Amino acid sequence: MLPPCLWMHKRSGAVVDPDGRIVVLLVEDEASYVDALSIGLVGEGFVVAAASTIAEARTQFAAVRPDIVLLDVMLPDGSGVDYCRELRSSSNTPVIMVTARSEEVDVILGLEFGASDYVTKPYRLRELIARIRAVLRRSTSEPSTDIITSIGDIRIDTSRRSVMRNGEELELSRKEFDLLALFASRLGQVVTRDECLDEIWWGRDLTDTRTLDTHVKRLRQKIEVDPGNPAHLVTIRGVGFRLDP
Ligand code: CA
């Protein structure tokens, strides 16, 4: 169980925390994760409410109205994927699924049913916090759950995680899609290299930042008519990239 000092709740019915802090609902049945995460998140200025079952999560969700939900896949009274689906039917609150590696299939289902992202145990606190901030940034810049961006003859649908050209689906890897969605969320604006690394690679220190360039190159091969002379995904030398419509 959490020490009482970590049980901080927003007033029932309040939409915004009085201090403007981000309220995280942590749905997790492994006490070691709950303890470590709660201490880490509170230390970073988040307000944490915890639930160890789906039943508790329902009660807590109604009571604290979290800004984001961290949702374990395997819970004692059911599947986090099912609870994610249930949440999605009544709320736009972003959900990050937390999974063990063997639960990958469930996680993909979870994303199809509206989770914003997932992390795999074991994960580092720093990575998780970068992920929470990235998801919250995306959710506040995206006014609805059904986002379609048109770039030339390319259509990017972030709710379905699909990219179509003239009605034909393009095959993008997960990172390629995330990167393209990041650029699309800031259409016509520069996204710095650091922002790309923070949001897509969770601020992980890449020993080889050419990983980013490799992904941009592959994206161009898929979305540009002339990848060597890109019309949409342009490099801003020394700064980053910009996606133009
Ligand atoms: Ca579990």
Image (cartoon, rainbow, N blue to C red):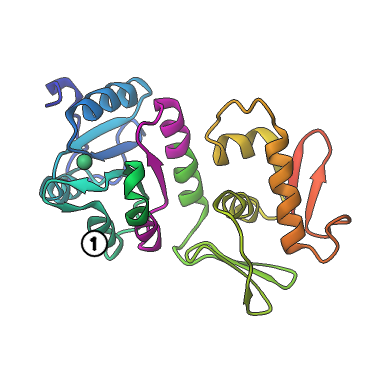
Task: Give the x, y percent position of residue 232.
Answer: 78, 59
Judge: label 1 CB < 8 Å from ligand 1: no
* Vertical order, 166 against 128 (above or below): below
Label 1 sits on residue: 86
Magenta stretch in the rendered image: 108-132
Name the spot of residue 91 as percent of width and height, x first: 30, 59
Ligand 1 in which quarter: top left
Residue sitting farthest toward the right: 229
Residue found 58% across the figure and 55% down from its top: 173
- Tag 1: amino acid: Glu
- Which residue is most to the bottom? 167
Q: Quadrant of the N terminus?
A: top left
Please name the residue shown 62% across and 52% down the image. 176
239 or 222, which is in the foreground? 222
* 174 to the left or right of 82: right
Image height of 71 relative to 50, above or below:
below
Front-most of residues 197 and 140: 197
